[in-house]
Image (cartoon, rainbow, N blue to C red):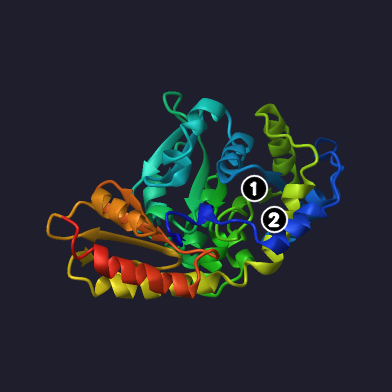
Amino acid sequence: MEIVELRSDTMTRPTPAMRRAMANAEVGDDCFGEDPTVNRLEEAMAALLGKEAALFVTSGTQGNQLAVRSQTHHGNDVIAERYCHLFNAEAGAAGALSGVQVRLLTGERGVFTPAQMEEVIQRGDNVHYGRTALVAVENTHNKSGGYPWPVEALSRVSECGRSNNLRVHMDGARLFNACASTGLNAQTYTQYVDTVSVCLSKGLGAPVGSVLAGDQATIDAARYYRKMLGGGMRQAGVLAAAGLYAMEHNISRLREDHDHATRLGKALADLENVEIDLDEIHSNMIFFSLRNGLDPFEAVDRLSEEGVRMLAMKPGVIRAVTHLDVSGDQIDRAIEVCREVLTRVS
């Protein structure tokens, strides 16, 4: 049975061409700074993002946490959105590894405002409170259906942060999806942040890896902490080659994934038992719920039995994510299965 994998864009697999690039990669010892393929990846990503330097890391979580560790001290506060990945899905790392407290703001589609920031910023003039050091934004915002931050809102948050001597970090795991959605280039966003992490292993199709970019001093510090946390790699060029291939071939095609998500969403909207807001499909993510008391976990199990994999999430939401391993024909198959299964699940 053919499987249509829609649980996450982390499910992408390297193509034969990417595997060839990995097999042919020139390698060295990255801990000595001598892996030429890693160096090329870091230089290329720094240039693409408009930053002085970049660091190849094993995951988006590692990139985010190195950004926190490199720009804060123990006891500092970090401002972030309530449903952000950095706080909710990184195993409590900010507190455990950096000793910081996270001040959570409730945003609109993941977007918060300078006024909200001003309510929680601690400037160090009262010994009872931790000092705010960093503000983190997530673009696109996962829990908000892959919503891209409006540049104007990001600019205002950045201005507020910098006027209060705060560093600004962007969790840009799906930054290039934001670019595909809005038509803007990456530097239009990254000019407003001090550091940015981007994932190679989601919609870009690499098997592993992310990149953290920023000013040279911060990236030097992040490299030190990466080693401290066991993230130093040796002949990592075989992995970096996949990232370079992804940059060169897979960024430009992300719009196709968004079109597939929109087409699937429109088909789901035609089903009586499905509740979905088509205006909330902003990139490659779809979130929907079921009417008439239908159980989303049972529905997902039934879909999986028919070869279509989605993710049931609490409270009562189903997620589907399109990516480069999902073809137009597979979207047609997913629509057919949804029409059959979601009309009879009980």
Rendered position, 99 above or below 284: above
Q: Report the front residue among 216 and 56.
A: 56
Rendered position, 135 above or below 157: above
Few, some or many C-alpha atoms within 10 Å of disc 2 (few <14, some 14-19, many ≥20)? many
Rendered position, 4 above or below 59: below
Residue 78: assigned label: none
Q: Report the front residue among 230 and 236.
A: 236
**Quarter of the image where one finds residue 261:** bottom left
Callout 2, which amino acid? Answer: Gly
Q: Residue drawn 70% across and 46% down?
A: 56
Q: Residue furthest left?
A: 292
Q: Report the front residue among 247 and 228.
A: 247
Residue 107 can be seen, yes or no: no
Callout 1, which amino acid? Answer: Gly
Q: Alpha carbon of mark 2 to alpha carbon of mark 1: how far?
A: 7 Å
Residue 339 can be seen, yes or no: yes
Q: Report the front residue among 318 and 117.
A: 318
Pointers 2 and 1 in contact (C-beta within 8 Å): yes
The residue singled out by tag 1 in the image is: 209
The residue singled out by tag 2 in the image is: 243
Q: Position of residue 339 (x, y in %)?
A: 26, 70
Q: Residue furthest front?
A: 1
Q: Secondary structure at mark 2?
A: helix
- Sequence order check, earlier mark of 2 and 1: 1
Q: Position of residue 322 (x, y in %)?
A: 46, 64
Few, some or many C-alpha atoms within 10 Å of disc 1 (few <14, some 14-19, many ≥20)? many
Quadrant the N terminus occupies: bottom left
